[in-house]
Amino acid sequence: MDQRTELLLKLDILKEFYTEEIETISEYFSIHKFFDLQVIMPQTGQDSSFGIILSGEVSISDDKIENSSRTKGDILGEMAFIHGFRSDFIAASDGAIAIMTFDDIEKLKLKHPYLAVKLVDFVTHNLVNNLRKNDKKDNTEILVLLADDHLFSDLINLIKDHLHIINKFSIFTSEKLKIILEKNTNLTISQVIEPQSLILGETAIGHQILLDQVKAIMYLRDPVKVESNPASVEALSRLCDLQQVLFATNLLTANAIFQYLE
């Protein structure tokens, strides 16, 4: 049994994994020592790794997190799974961390698909639990309203028909639609999101979906046209399926959802 396996087996957080599974997973982790005040896992713009602290203490530079200290067994960088970026991590003592890149996860998936899914599920659940601990927003459910440019008028008419239902929710939409909707429907917009990056990024809605805060998403679109951004919509659709969030891309389905919400 190599050193990586021995170190990971000492972590209580991995108790749901069998010894044989940890032996396999350890092959895809790399062990890195760090020193007091050292920046750990420096940001790369689009971050692509996560780590598990093996020893020592690390501080997270994020004002939104009440307890920014992380110690042995805690995971760092899991926010990159949905945001594509994360906070700065500064060592508060000497220690060591086991790091796995997303490329390593892909390699694991090729040889051991079940184990890769189990690992990602484990890290994601840890992320959701941390988000719930630090979430300070109100409990009003979110309704996301988006549309391709040439379908703006259809969305406006849809909203007018169901305004009595929509007003019960916090509304998320794009910057362009925010201006149009507030002018034409007197709708109050709670937050602006970027439709070209629906899951990844600061203005995305990935973590709200994981927190079960999103009730439904209406994204009127023409799948034939380039502006519909099929890759982002496909990723959003899969996340909605996973979290059982209502998702409509056409008027027929959108009207059916509003009937259900009523």
Image (cartoon, rainbow, N blue to C red):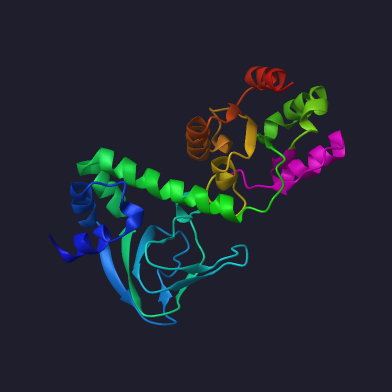
Pick out the residue farthest to the bottom: 36
Q: Residue at x 41, y 80 (%)?
A: 93
Q: Is residue 206 visible?
A: yes
Q: Residue at x 56, y 31 (%)?
A: 225
- The quadrant in which residue 71 appears is bottom left
Residue 222: x and y in percent read: 59, 27
Direction from residue 103 to residue 228 in the image, left or right = right
Residue 157: x and y in percent read: 79, 25
* Quadrant of the image containing the N terminus: bottom left
- The quadrant in which residue 211 appears is top right
Q: Is residue 223 above or below residue 232?
A: above
* Quadrant of the image containing the C terminus: top right
Residue 114: x and y in percent read: 27, 38
Q: Residue at x 38, y 47 (%)?
A: 122
Direction from residue 3 to residue 240 in the image, left or right = right
- The quadrant in which residue 99 appears is bottom left
Q: Is residue 175 visible?
A: no
Q: Is residue 233 magenta?
A: no
Query: Which range is magenta?
Result: 170-197
Residue 213: x and y in percent read: 63, 40
Q: Residue at x 36, y 62 (%)?
A: 52
Direction from residue 167 to residue 52 in the image, left or right = left
Q: Is 17 in front, or is 255?
A: 17
Q: Is 247 in front, or is 181?
A: 247
Q: Is residue 210 above or below residue 12?
A: above
Q: Is residue 173 magenta?
A: yes
